[in-house]
Image (cartoon, rainbow, N blue to C red):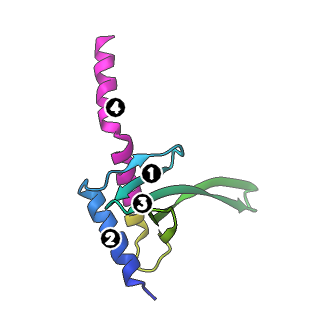
Amino acid sequence: MVDERTVKFFEGVLSKTKAGKIPWEPTALEARFIAPIGGEFSLSISAVVEPVSLRDAALRVTIKGGFDRYTLVLRDLHGKVLTTVTENDEGVRPDAMRELYETARREAIRPDEKINKAIEVLQTL
């Protein structure tokens, strides 16, 4: 059963993030970003690589790898978790969760600005 509030919350965060209205910031964890909203809440989005191991008996090989799982968390002023959204929630598209994470990551670390700066530095060498 689809939790309409969860979907509405997620879509609102995605929309505002894409519009540049949520001030995502990096944390000490490379794959986690946080943002205060409205003076009463905070958001965090994180990615965790889930290990996957596939064994093909016929070829006698094991392929190891992983895939990202994303989690969006809403907390109150006291750090209490109010809701958690993952790509497994009904009504939340996995590609949209990945888009939210990547957009938040780019907002937080601003790679384009840093790459431009690196290009300027390279030009002076």
| SS label for mark 3 | strand
Q: What element carries label 2?
A: helix
Residue at which label 3 appears: 43
Asked if the stretch drawn in magenta spans residue 56, the answer is no
Q: In x, y percent, where is residue 93?
A: 40, 71
Going by the numbered disc 2, the residue's amino acid type is: Glu
Inspect the image, locate mark 3, and give the three-letter code of the amino acid beneath it.
Leu
Residue type at the position of mark 1: Phe
Q: Nearer the viewer, mark 2 or mark 1?
A: 1
Residues under numbered marks 4 and 2 in contact, where contact means CB atoms less than 8 Å apart = no
Please give the name of the residue rendered at 46% of the width and 89% of the height, measured from the top-left corner: 1
Instruction: Say which residue appears at 28% left-offset and 29% top-offset.
Output: 116
Q: Which residue lies furthest to the front in this view?
A: 78
Point out the stretch of residues depicted in magenta.
Answer: 99-125
Q: Give the mark toward the camera: 3 or 2.
A: 3
Rendered image: mark on residue 114: 4
Q: Is tag 2's residue or tag 1's residue first in the polypeptide sequence? A: 2
What is the magenta segment's predominant secondary structure? helix
The dot on residue 121 is: none
Circle 4 — which element? helix
Q: Which of marks 4 and 3 is in front?
A: 3
Few, some or many residues within 10 Å of mark 2 (<14, 14–19, 20+): some
Cα separation between marks 2 and 1: 18 Å
Q: Which of 82 and 84 is in front in this view?
A: 82
Residue at the disc numbered 1: 33
